[in-house]
Structures are given as C-alpha cells and as structure tokens.
Amino acid sequence: MNLKKMLLLAGMALAAVAFAAPAAAQAEGTWTKNHVPITENTNVSVNGFVGFATAFGGYGCPASGTATLEPGGGGTVNTFVIGNTAECEGTGFLAACELVNHEVTAGLPYELTATHEDFDIIGDITVWNEYDAECGFGELEVEFNEITVTAENPTTATNLTLSGQNGVVNVAGQQLEAEAYGNGTLSPGGVYGVE
C-alpha cells in the first residue's frame, strides 16, 4: 500500500471517529432539575396505574413507586407498590378476578437509565399475584426485563407513559407473552426531566 492510500485510510478513520464520538455522547441523557443537570442524588415518586396484557386478557391496578435519580443519567427504582386493589381491572380470562394478594418477588432496586427522550427501568422485574376463588386458577407471576417510560415533554417530565415488551405471564403451567402498560404522574412535576 502506498503512502497516499495509507494517509487517505487514516484520514477516513479519523473522520469516522470524529462523527461517531458526538453520537455516542448523545446516547445517554442527563437528569435535570429546572433544565440544569442535577449534582446530587434526588428522590422522586410516581403515582399511577400499571398493568399487563396478553392475547387472552390482562390486569391493571393503581400503583406507586419511588426512585433515586443520580447525577448523570443513572439511578434506581427503590419501591413499587400496588395501591387500592378494589380499583384493579381485569380483562379477558382475568375479567372476573379480584386481586387478594401480591408481592414484588425479585429485582428491587431496579436500574434506571435516562436517554434524551425517555428512561428505561432495567432488571428482573417480577410480580406475583394471587386472585380470589372466583378466578379459577388462583395465582400467576408476571416477568419483564425492561420497561420504557416516556413523558409528554421529556425536559419537564410530569405525565408519564409506561410500556414493556417481551414479558412473560406464568399461569396454570403455561407461559403467555405479555406487554406492560401504564401511566403516572411524577412528583414533584414539571421540575425534573431528561436532556
């Protein structure tokens, strides 16, 4: 290979690195308070409604949780609690079921990672549900590895939407593919976001 070709290849490699570096730097977001990056761990809470859906039905309940936002784009989800079970709703094969007991059986705290548009909850997210005798099968377990949370306006995250793909519901010896869904309100609202 002659010197001109080597210089041309070296120049192309440097150009590729120069273009790739800004893209990589933008891959992760930063937690902000009033559009200024946070400089210390900050606790927030979320109240809303979450659930799962399968091809045969699903179940949703009021829920709340707390999280710690860390400087940069990291953090943890520290608690996840099902609220008033009388307000839970079932569809399809779970339409007649009433939740009588539940437990987050694995994973807490979950990892929390910000991007510029949303944030991801990552971990062994596993919830065990027990239903009343009318339900017909008694209990099931819901598992997800990642759930994405988006906000109407990521820079002032108040109203949140939750979605998860590739989940599994273990019920009566069967595994059903599941999706997670939900919505919630971040507190304090309009103050924290990702940029």
Image (cartoon, rainbow, N blue to C red):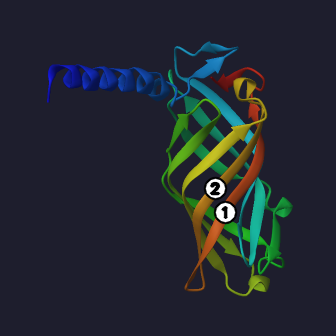
User: Visible in this render: residue 142?
Assistant: no
Q: Report the disc number at residue 145.
A: none
The image position of residue 54, as x and y in percent, is 70, 72
The image position of residue 91, as x and y in percent, is 82, 73
Location of residue 35 with respect to 103 vertically, above or below: above
Mark 2 and mark 1 lie on one chain; the one further toward the N terminus is 2
In contact (CB < 8 Å): disc 2 and disc 1: yes
Mark 1 = which residue? 179
**Residue 116 or 186: which is nearer the viewer?**
116
The image position of residue 21, as x and y in percent, is 41, 23
Q: Residues within 10 Å of mark 1 (few under 14, many from 20)?
A: many
Location of residue 157 with respect to 100 vertically, above or below: above
Q: How far is disc 2 from disc 1 in space, using C-alphas?
A: 5 Å
Occupied quadrant, residue 78: top right
Q: Report the disc number at residue 164.
A: 2
Which quadrant: the N terminus? Answer: top left
Secondary structure, mark 2, is strand
Q: Which amino acid does label 1 sit on?
A: Glu
User: Visible in this render: residue 45?
Assistant: yes
Which quadrant: the C terminus? Answer: top right
Location of residue 194 with respect to 92 vertically, above or below: above
Q: How crowded is mark 2: few (under 14 residues within 10 Å), some or many (20 or more)?
A: some
Residue at 48% in and 53% down: 107
